[in-house]
Image (spheres, grey):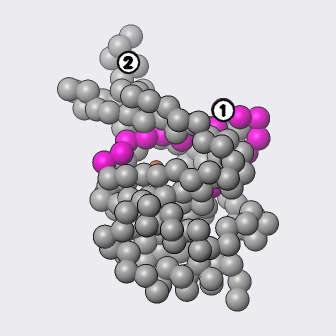
């Protein structure tokens, strides 16, 4: 059974609708997420600033493989009604957290450095951005429940225009 089939089998067997990030982490600890097996699924950036490969998706959950080349970052976003857990399989990342000001624009509220091999979480209502400031690519496995829908992006450029 190949790696993706194994991920499908594990996720199909679970009731995921009311899952917490910590419960997602426990599920991920039961998966073999070695980079060797997942490397054929690493995508280059196309319509997004980073590569994103959907490995599994139902209404209940989505598993994706994320690839941020050096010097790239995601848009500032939330995850709609979903929660998430992720494991950084290669490289380093900065997880930048934001809160909305009175005008609805994102203001940086904190940054956390993520080391290779560690887990990080997307609790409900989190607004964040992942940035790869390191010299090598960053590859991460992300698991969301339910599958993200109604995700919002926050236009940081407009904030800069406003400030300037
Ligand atoms: Fe995210």
Query: Which numbered mark, 1 or 2, is in the foreground of this view?
Result: 1
How many residues crowd around disc 1 within 10 Å: few (fewer than 14), some, or many (20 or more)?
some
Quadrant (top left/top right/bottom left/bottom right) for the C terminus: top left
In the rendered image, residue 101, in percent from the top left (x then y), is placed at 26, 27
| Residue 40 appearing in the image | no
- Outermost residue, right side: 36
Q: Is mark 2 within 8 Å of ligand 1?
A: no
Callout 1: SS = loop
Instruction: Identify whether 79 is placed above or below 56.
Output: above
| Chain part drawn in magenta | 125-140
Which class describes the residues within 10 Å of circle 2: few (<14), some (14-19), or many (20+)? few
Q: Is residue 41 left or right of residue 87?
A: right
Q: Residue furthest top?
A: 164
Residue 31's spot in the image, x, y percent? 62, 73
- In the drawing, what numbered circle is on residue 133? 1
Q: Residue at x 56, y 68 (%)?
A: 28
Residue 7 forms part of the magenta stretch:
no
Write down the quadrant of residue 6 in the picture: bottom right
Q: Which picture quadrant has residue 10?
A: bottom right
Task: Name the image quarter holding the N terminus.
Answer: bottom right
- Judge by depth and name the residue closer to the eye, 42 or 140: 140
Residue 161 is tagged as 2
Asked whether the beta carbons under mark 1 and mark 2 sit within 8 Å of each other, the answer is: no
x 71%, y 34%: residue: 134
Q: Is residue 131 magenta?
A: yes
């Amino acid at each position: 059974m190949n790696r993706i089939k194994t991920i499908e089998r594990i996720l199909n067997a679970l009731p995921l609708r009311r899952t917490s990030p910590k419960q997602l982490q426990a599920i991920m600890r039961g998966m073999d997420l070695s980079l060797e097996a997942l490397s054929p699924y690493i995508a280059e950036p196309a319509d997004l600033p980073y590569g994103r490969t959907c490995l599994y998706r139902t209404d209940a959950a989505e598993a994706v493989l994320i690839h941020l080349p050096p010097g790239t970052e995601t848009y500032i976003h939330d995850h709609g009604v979903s929660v998430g857990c992720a494991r950084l399989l290669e490289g380093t990342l900065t997880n930048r957290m934001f809160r909305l000001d009175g005008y609805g624009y994102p203001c940086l509220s904190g940054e956390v450095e993520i080391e290779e091999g560690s887990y990080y979480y997307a609790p409900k209502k989190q607004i964040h951005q992942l940035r790869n400031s390191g010299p090598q690519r960053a590859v991460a496995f992300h698991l969301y429940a339910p599958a993200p829908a109604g995700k919002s992006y926050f236009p940081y450029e407009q904030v800069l225009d406003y400030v300037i």
